[in-house]
Amino acid sequence: MNWSVLYRGDRIELYYKEKSRGSYKLLKKPYCDICSSPLANGSTCSWTHTHPTFAKRIYAMGYYKPTNSYRRSGEADVLSQHIYYAKRNIWKGEPLGLAIAECIKNRYPELLKFDFLVAIPRYKTEYHEDEDSGEPFNPTDILAKWINHGTGIPIITPLEKTREQKMKELSLLERKQKARGLYQYVPSPVKDKSILLIDDVSTSSSTIDECAKILVRNGGARKVCGFVCGKNDPD
């Protein structure tokens, strides 16, 4: 393990081989208690079409800014940078997963009682290729691995993706429509269990909610929530 992380209340400090590598800015109130979207005030947002139906809540470590956005602004958004580069190199998912584990332990300890972690699956043609080794990988599998390392919550794989489908550039309504039937259940011991779905970014909540629906309806899961590295503002 090359990375270590330290929870500081409003941020997660990052160290690579004991040298400081900046920090992740954590989510700050006010934000929606259901989908983690930013709010002007109150506890739930007005974007009811982004709210999950089957996932009880979607937790987020911080806010995600698309690559071009933070490059234009000149801001040192370490979280968004790491989310981007974790799709290029397997080892770059390590600090993100460890940081989520620290958030769970220090901000959301109720999640430590969950029975299983489930990484959102990709279709076989959607796997990324490590720029160094050429090894194909799913970035969310790497996140789940390091969250498991930090929390001890077991990982299971009760879902498969049925086809290739990109959500980028789609409207919120299109995302919900395209998510239907995109995943299928693989028999697993999820009946009456609590499941924490893991993904890198959430915009419309469609992917997590579709997976939660399958786990609840087909597998009999008792409770499903999601946890993402970054929440993308749906506005």
Image: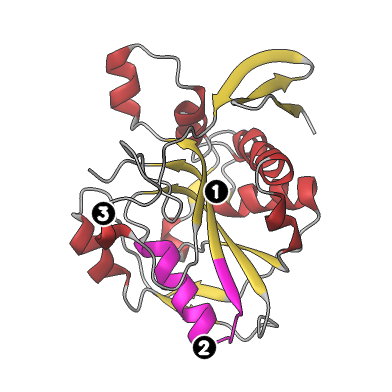
The residue at which mark 2 appears reads as: 218
> Residue 171 in the image: x percent, y percent?
18, 54
> Residue 15 in the image: x percent, y percent?
72, 20
Q: Which mark is residue 47?
A: 3
Q: Amino acid at mark 3?
A: Trp
> Residue 60 in the image: x percent, y percent?
51, 45
Give the alpha-carbon distance from disc 3 to disc 1, as whole Å. Answer: 28 Å
> Residue 172 in the image: x percent, y percent?
22, 57
Give the alpha-carbon distance from disc 1 to disc 2, as whole Å. Answer: 25 Å
Q: In the picture provided, is 27 more to the left or to the right than 221?
A: left
Q: Quadrant of the N terminus?
A: top right
Q: Which residue is located at x 21 percent, y 48 percent?
A: 169
Tell whether position 215 is magenta.
yes
SS at circle 2? loop
Q: Which mark is residue 139?
A: 1
Magenta extent: 206-224
Q: Amino acid at mark 1?
A: Pro
Give the alpha-carbon distance from disc 2 to disc 3, as whole Å. Answer: 28 Å
